[in-house]
Image (cartoon, grey):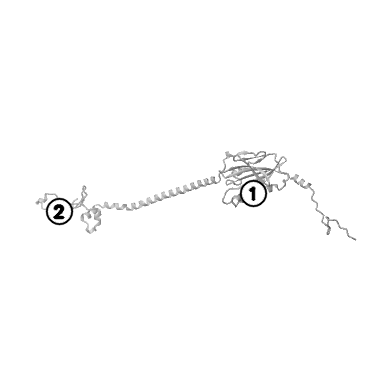
Amino acid sequence: MAGKSFRCPACKAVISPLTLSASADSDPDSDESDEPSPPRSIQKGPSSRAASALPRSQRPRDEELEEDIEPEEEEPVREKPLRKKRPKRKKSSAGLIVGLVAGGAVLLLLVMGAGGGVLWYLLRNKTIPQSEWQTFSPPNSGCTVLMPGTATEQTLNILGITAKTYQVERKKEDAYFAVTIFDISPLLLRPSLLEDVAKSSRDGAKSRMDAIEPGSKVTSESAISLGNLPGREYQITPPPTKRGTFITRLYLAKIGNTHRIFLLMAGGSIIQPNTGDAARFFDSFKIDNTATPPTFGDATKRDAAKPPQANPKPNLPGANPGRRPSRRQP
């Protein structure tokens, strides 16, 4: 190590060869020759920040030698590019996390949307529990039908005829069901009877709905049948602010010697044609097997047996049948 600078392993100070040569050239006879080298021979290098702040021309020679001796201390600078890449990794992982969170949020919204759609459908299309439907037969009617509860008896006037109506109202589901039965007098029996009763019932139902809120509309009118029995059906939709449909079906049958009309009604926000509770109600209606189609022959024969009224003879001009002719005086 002669003639070279080295670092003390204990204090990390740089030992310069100039100090050693100065002590060797000193006078051997002097008192100072036997004493160790002065403390200035051991120089503690300045901090790296102070050295870097000075220009290279003003730096101590020891620091220049220190830079030459230990270039390894500059190696950490090479790690700077690696440090720059780390934020990118964090950014990519953060982007992945954001993507997963966003995807989870979208999936959650889809699930909630699907669940909300099912809930909306169930609330909008709620039906009456099947266990609450029971078979009902009006007294002396010759028919049966399923009703969602105990029916209450009321009266209804159609074409001047007071008929009995059996009705069940479901406030929870906003629906009601009714069956009306009445017999037809032979004097009213005619081929257009069923059509006339359907029209009267339709107009009465629409006027009652318009009295509560105008805007109802007759959306359907058609001829139907129950086996070989003729029938009619009409449908009325409420104003746009309300939901549901009012449906009425009428059948005309001959039971024994009596002609009878059966009128079934269903309405409310949950009532829709040919589905749900409406289908269950109308499809369950049955009439006694002894019922036959109406016969209008008796009414036709009775009308034909009456002779037509003779037209009166026209009065002759100038004739006065109510007065006797006067005698002329000679």
Residue on which disc 1 sits? 204
Quadrant of the rendered image containing residue 151: top right
| SS at circle 1 | helix
Which of the two discs, 1 and 2, labels the residue nearer the N terminus?
2
Mark drawn on residue 243: none
Instruction: Determine the secondary structure under disc 2.
Output: helix
67 lies above or below 293: below
- Which residue is at the front of the view, 242 or 48? 242
From the top left corner, tell me how far across and down residue 139 is, in percent.
66, 38
Query: In the drawing, does residue 233 fall left or right of residue 315?
Result: left
Q: Circle 2: is it few (<14), some (14-19), or many (20+) Cα within 10 Å? A: few
Residues at badges 1 and 2 in contact (C-beta under 8 Å)? no
Residue extending farthest right: 330
Disc 2 residue type (three-letter)? Ala
Residue 101: x %, y % from top left: 43, 48
Give the labeled residue for mark 2: 22
Q: Residue at x 52, y 45 (%)?
A: 119
Measured as percent of width and height from the top left, residue 41 is found at 17, 52
> Whole-percent x and y of residue 109?
47, 48
Q: Is residue 116 left or right of residue 48?
A: right
Q: Amino acid at mark 1?
A: Gly
Front-lying residue, 241 or 224: 241
